Image (tube, rainbow, N blue to C red):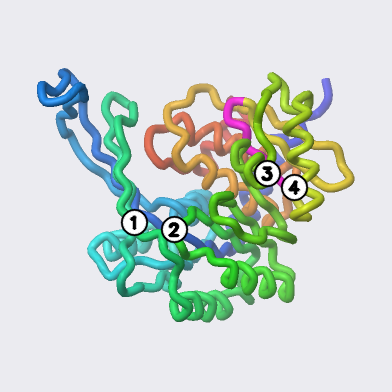
């Protein structure tokens, strides 16, 4: 039997080194609200379930959840984005501070609402989601303030992650400046793309689209799907086009129950099967992937090692309900179940 591509001892070594890394996260931050309850009847007013309220909880979402995943893995994270001058913004900052996430880079912007995603969950199943947010591009003054803060922190950073959720913080001018800053300083730059937000995503260290996003970025229809990614000619064509047109150092396409596909120019794509045992909730899984992969690379992991580690992390968080994270202990246990 061949040796595993990532052993438990090597995973422990990477996670230990990760505790000394510092990652800056830039993008659209959100406050995730969960209303938990049970359903025992259908409303007499409309054919919808009546949810009996039990409790509610709040946690960081969007780019803030990427930062939350980093600190859960014992790394240092600082967050840069925009919030409204409202109660939700103040609540988000309090939660972040309580989780030791640096939030000095969160810019209060007049006229903007802090993004709130309210999920109503009954019996472990999401019933409905309500979004309250501003989607307009952030004004130039806000972008300038965000960049000024980023520049002062970049000299001590090991990597930067951009989380674009299409809420207006990640503009082309912001991304161009971040790319130039990271290139000059030799800092790793990862981005989680939002194809409906048409940006020039060329020459990044890592992009992490899911299957739908990858096809959208490549402007190709997803007409057929094969049971094994490496036999999926359409998927292979998409990967080749994105590598040639966007020229990232690495392309990681997440494929849900089929795992992940790691792609580099001049090399055959590498498929990592999923390790998820049960799937309860996929919300935030992409945040876990980009956070874990970037952190692992910053800690000295190879691309394949980083992909395997992030696949294990995703397999853990989808087995939890709500926007979840994982810990070094849980990750190591997944290598020695």
Element at label 4: helix
Residue 59 relative to residue 137: left or right: left
Query: Contact, CB < 8 Å: mark 3 with mark 2?
Result: no
Mark 3 = which residue?
219
Answer whether residue 252 is magenta in the image: yes
Mark 1 = which residue?
133
Kindly report the distance in space between the C-alpha atoms of the residues bearing marks 3 and 4. Answer: 10 Å
Q: Residue at x 63, y 31 (%)?
A: 335
Query: Contact, CB < 8 Å: mark 1 with mark 4?
Result: no
Query: Contact, CB < 8 Å: mark 1 with mark 2?
Result: yes
Q: Nearer the viewer, mark 3 or mark 4?
A: 3
Disc on res. 35: none
| Dot 3 or dot 4, earlier in sequence | 3
Q: Nearer the viewer, residue 147 or 196?
A: 196
Mark 4 = which residue?
242
In this rendering, the answer to whether 168 lies above or below 246 is below
Magenta-drawn segment: 251-257
Q: Residue at x 65, y 42 (%)?
A: 214
Q: Residue at x 78, y 36 (%)?
A: 237
Q: Residues within 10 Å of mark 3 (few under 14, many from 20)?
A: few
Disc on res. 167: 2
Q: Position of residue 240 (x, y in %)?
A: 80, 42
Q: Quadrant of residue 216?
A: top right
Answer whether residue 68 is magenta in the image: no
Kindly report the distance in space between the C-alpha atoms of the residues bearing marks 4 and 2. Answer: 24 Å
In this rendering, the answer to whether 95 lies above or below 145 is above
Q: Nearer the viewer, residue 70 or 329?
A: 70
Kindly report the distance in space between the C-alpha atoms of the residues bearing marks 1 and 3. Answer: 28 Å
Q: Nearer the viewer, mark 1 or mark 3?
A: 3
| Dot 4 or dot 2, earlier in sequence | 2
Q: Position of residue 127 (x, y in %)?
A: 30, 30
């Amino acid at each position: 039997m061949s040796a595993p591509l990532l052993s438990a001892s090597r995973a422990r070594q990477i996670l230990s080194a990760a505790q000394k890394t510092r990652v800056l996260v830039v993008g659209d931050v959100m406050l995730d609200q969960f209303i938990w309850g049970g359903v025992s009847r259908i409303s007499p007013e409309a054919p919808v379930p009546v949810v009996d309220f039990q409790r509610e909880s709040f946690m960081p979402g969007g780019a803030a959840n990427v930062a939350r995943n980093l600190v859960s893995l014992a790394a240092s994270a600082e967050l840069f984005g925009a919030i409204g001058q409202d109660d939700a913004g103040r609540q988000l900052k309090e939660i972040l501070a309580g989780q030791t996430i640096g939030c000095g880079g969160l810019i209060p912007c007049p006229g903007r609402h802090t993004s709130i995603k309210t999920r109503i969950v009954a019996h472990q199943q999401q019933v409905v989601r309500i979004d309250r947010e501003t989607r307009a591009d952030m004004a130039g003054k806000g972008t300038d303030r965000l960049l000024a803060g980023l520049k002062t922190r970049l000299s001590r950073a090991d990597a930067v992650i951009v989380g674009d959720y299409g809420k207006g913080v990640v503009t082309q001018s912001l991304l161009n400046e971040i790319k130039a800053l990271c290139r000059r300083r030799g800092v790793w730059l990862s981005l989680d793309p939002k194809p409906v937000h048409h940006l020039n995503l060329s020459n990044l260290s890592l992009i992490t689209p899911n299957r739908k996003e990858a096809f959208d970025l490549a402007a190709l229809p997803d007409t057929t799907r094969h049971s094994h990614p490496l036999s999926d000619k359409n998927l292979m064509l998409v990967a080749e086009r994105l590598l040639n047109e966007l020229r990232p150092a690495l392309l990681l396409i997440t494929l849900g129950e089929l795992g992940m596909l790691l792609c580099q120019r001049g090399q055959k794509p590498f498929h990592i099967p999923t390790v998820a045992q049960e799937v309860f909730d996929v919300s935030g899984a992409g945040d876990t992937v980009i956070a874990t992969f970037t952190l692992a690379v910053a800690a000295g992991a190879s691309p394949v090692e980083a992909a395997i580690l992030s696949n294990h992390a995703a397999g853990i968080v989808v087995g939890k309900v709500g926007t979840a994270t994982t810990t070094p202990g849980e990750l190591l246990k997944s290598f020695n179940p």
